Image (tube, rainbow, N blue to C red):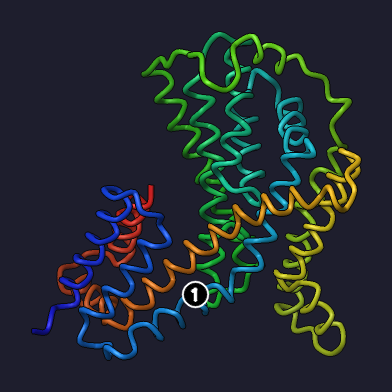
Amino acid sequence: MELHPLVVLLIAICVVFVLIIRLKINAFLALITAAITVGVLSSQVAFSEVMPETAAAFGRVCGGIGIVIALAALIGQCLMESGAADKIVRVFVRAIGEKNASLSLLTSGYVLSIPVFFDTVFYLLVPLARAMRVRTGKNYLFFLMAISAGGAVTHSMVPPTPGPLAMADTLNIDLGTMILVGAIVGAFMSIAGWLFARLRNSQMEVPLRETAGLTLEELEVLAAKQEEQLPSFALSMAPIILPVLMITANTLSGALGVTGPVADISAFIGNPNFALLVSAAVAMYLLMQQKNYSLTEMGGTVETAFASGGLIILITAAGGSFGGMLQKAGVGTVLGDMASEFGVPLLLMSFLLGALLKVAQG
């Protein structure tokens, strides 16, 4: 019996939900299983081609984003361990002022979530938000939501974080363009999130509670900590700014129609894989200088970063397999036809489907 593509989609989504939410299966395994389920149920995919197509879609996505995500994870780990991320936060707080602490956290989250995964940025900034709550005695919800408003936007809009990186690769968008446009649009989105946070803060009072991490006494020590042990602001920002400049330079070279050896050099230097490799080298140097690590001692940091980045690569590529099989099954065409027939904006439908799957993944 031939199943309608939408029925195949619903069954696949149910598979994702049951495996991840009910059975607590890892998202990578759940998404690969869902991709195989789509292939098996769809009449558009030959049974003998289900596994080869699943593996091929996985490989295409992994080949496009794997190196960049791994290097981005290493950069983020080095920024955290060296104290560079803490330095960036402190400079923003000092520049904008403690009276505008929420804007400091918004800006810090916005900048740090470009090279560092959002959950890591959140963990980094929450103790500072708690310390600011100790200082001011109010606005705890405002501080927390400001972190999210800044960090979630660049995590979603600006490469080299996995989502926008995969989208740029899927739609064949120049990465420099993606970074510039994502950063500009993201700035307005962050401000909108900050305004909403301000509104909710005026409506709700969230108390500061003891946690399993830092006690209130430890937070007071954190609030009084000096900066002498931290790296310089310029060196702290270098791993973030350098790849952006390199990739953007290649974009501008293409836009200006530059040809010959200059164009070749620009294409090599501005390739995201090379740009992130240079940035990772700078970040590792920063950590080695700050902690006085040897190359051997750097091994632990590198392995920790790649363990985190490797999981992200697997999940993102598995999502690519799922999406590729849905495309093979004709789901995209059917959804597009339905959106046109019922007057539902395709962007809205895409957003709802994406949100549904992200909820399933936690």
Q: Position of residue 238 (x, y in %)?
A: 82, 50
Q: Which residue is drawn at 51% across and 28% down?
A: 144
Q: Position of residue 56 (x, y in %)?
A: 46, 83
- Answer few, some or many: residues within 10 Å of disc 1's Cα (few below 14, many 20 plus, some between 14 and 19): few
Q: Where is residue 192 in the image (x, y as percent from the top left)?
A: 47, 39
> In the rendered view, does 281 fall on the left or right side of 162?
right
Q: Residue furthest front?
A: 296
Q: Residue at x 84, y 80 (%)?
A: 265
**From the viewer's perspective, is residue 87 above or below residue 135?**
below
| Residue carrying label 1 | 170
> In the rendered view, does 191 fall on the left or right side of 112?
left
Q: How many labels does the image show?
A: 1
The amino acid on which the numbered mark 1 sits, given as a three-letter code, is: Thr
Element on which disc 1 rests: helix
Quarter of the image where one finds residue 216: top right
> In the rendered view, does 352 fall on the left or right side of 104?
left
**From the viewer's perspective, is residue 135 above or below residue 322?**
above
Q: Residue at x 87, y 38 (%)?
A: 291
Q: Which residue is drawn at 51% across and 64% down?
A: 314
Quarter of the image where one finds residue 104: top right
The quadrant of the image that shows the N terminus is bottom left
Q: Position of residue 151 (x, y in %)?
A: 56, 42
